């Protein structure tokens, strides 16, 4: 009888430890380390990804929570459209592009969007320069600003880059102070977190409005909406 009780207690303790480990691993990923979804997985997170893909016409059918071939194909299509590595896996960059920041590896998630003054400044610049552009174009404008900070040919702080004399038309005409919106905040956060759909560009310009002959000596890397992005 004592042996049965001891065995039962040991089994219960082992089960509890396993459950704790599973919970730590899951919640650690959900709130800290970025998840990576691949074909063959299933669950609530997969369903949320599918819902986003269906909403934006990348996936047809119901969100069943099963990461099958159709979902993988839809992810690849989405990644190509948004300038991401088209590997069919949903990692940090793809989660961010889908607007699922809570799975992208930040412990504080999207609740910090707009709280950081650097992100607010970047969002103001994005709004002033690219308010009417598609979301990926907004992120690309933010990425250009951050690429300049890292380049020795430009000032080494975001504020100095944004307000550099003659760099942004929106600074010259005062539009930089007109405000921002939630999409520009999201785009600023995505760029700040490392998404660069400009592919390392240092310049962006509207080919219809630009009067600079020099800007046309730049090599165009990609075009989003009404902006060319180049180096």
Image (tube, rainbow, N blue to C red):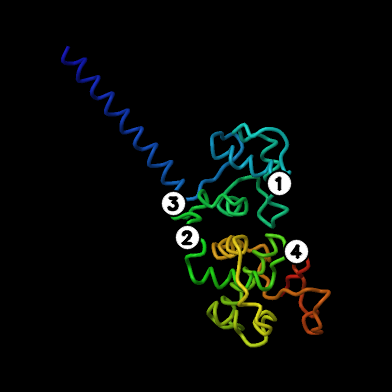
**Label 2: which secondary element:** helix
Q: Position of residue 91 (x, y in %)?
A: 57, 49
Q: CA distance from mark 2 to mark 1?
A: 25 Å
Q: Are marks 3 and 1 in contact (CB under 8 Å)?
A: no
Q: Of all residues shown, which one is farthest toward the left?
A: 2
**Residue at 54% across / 81% down in the picture?**
156
- Ranked by sequence position, the earlier of labels 4 and 1 is 1
Q: Position of residue 169 (x, y in %)?
A: 70, 81
- Ranked by sequence position, the earlier of labels 3 and 4 is 3
In the rendered image, which quarter is residue 165 located in?
A: bottom right
Front position in the image: 182 or 49: 182
Q: Are marks 2 and 3 in contact (CB under 8 Å)?
A: no
Q: Are marks 2 and 4 in contact (CB under 8 Å)?
A: no
- Ranked by sequence position, the earlier of labels 2 and 3 is 3
Q: Are marks 4 and 1 in contact (CB under 8 Å)?
A: no
Of the numbered discs in the image, which one, if any, rests on residue 32?
Answer: 3
**Crowd rating for badge 3 (residues with CA inside 10 Å; few <14, some 14–19, many 20+):** some
Q: Nearer the viewer, mark 2 or mark 3?
A: 2
Of the numbered discs in the image, which one, if any, rests on residue 224?
Answer: 4
**Label 3: which secondary element:** loop
The residue singled out by tag 1 in the image is: 56
137 relative to 72, above or below? below
Q: CA distance from mark 4 to mark 1?
A: 18 Å
**Crowd rating for badge 1 (residues with CA inside 10 Å; few <14, some 14–19, many 20+):** few
The residue singled out by tag 2 in the image is: 112
Front position in the image: 6 or 188: 188
């Amino acid at each position: 009888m004592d042996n049965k009780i001891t065995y039962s207690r040991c089994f219960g303790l082992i089960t509890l430890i396993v459950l704790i480990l599973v919970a730590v691993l899951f919640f650690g990923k959900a709130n800290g380390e970025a998840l990576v979804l691949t074909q063959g997985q299933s669950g609530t997170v997969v369903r949320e990804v599918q819902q986003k893909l269906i909403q934006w016409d990348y996936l047809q059918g119901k969100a069943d929570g099963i990461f099958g071939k159709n979902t993988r194909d839809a992810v690849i299509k989405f990644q190509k459209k948004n300038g991401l590595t088209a590997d069919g896996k949903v990692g940090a960059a793809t989660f961010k592009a889908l607007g699922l920041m809570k799975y992208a590896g930040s412990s504080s998630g999207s609740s910090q969007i707009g709280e950081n003054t650097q992100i607010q400044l970047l969002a103001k610049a994005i709004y002033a320069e690219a308010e009417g552009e598609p979301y990926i174009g907004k992120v690309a404008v933010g990425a250009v600003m951050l690429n300049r900070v890292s380049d020795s040919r430009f000032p080494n702080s975001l504020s100095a880059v944004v307000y550099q004399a003659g760099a942004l038309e929106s600074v010259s005409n005062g539009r930089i102070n007109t405000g921002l919106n939630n999409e520009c905040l999201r785009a600023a956060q995505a760029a700040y977190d490392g998404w660069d759909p400009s592919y390392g560009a240092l310049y962006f310009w509207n080919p219809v409005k630009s009067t600079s002959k020099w800007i046309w000596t730049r090599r165009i890397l990609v075009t989003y909406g009404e902006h060319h992005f180049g180096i």
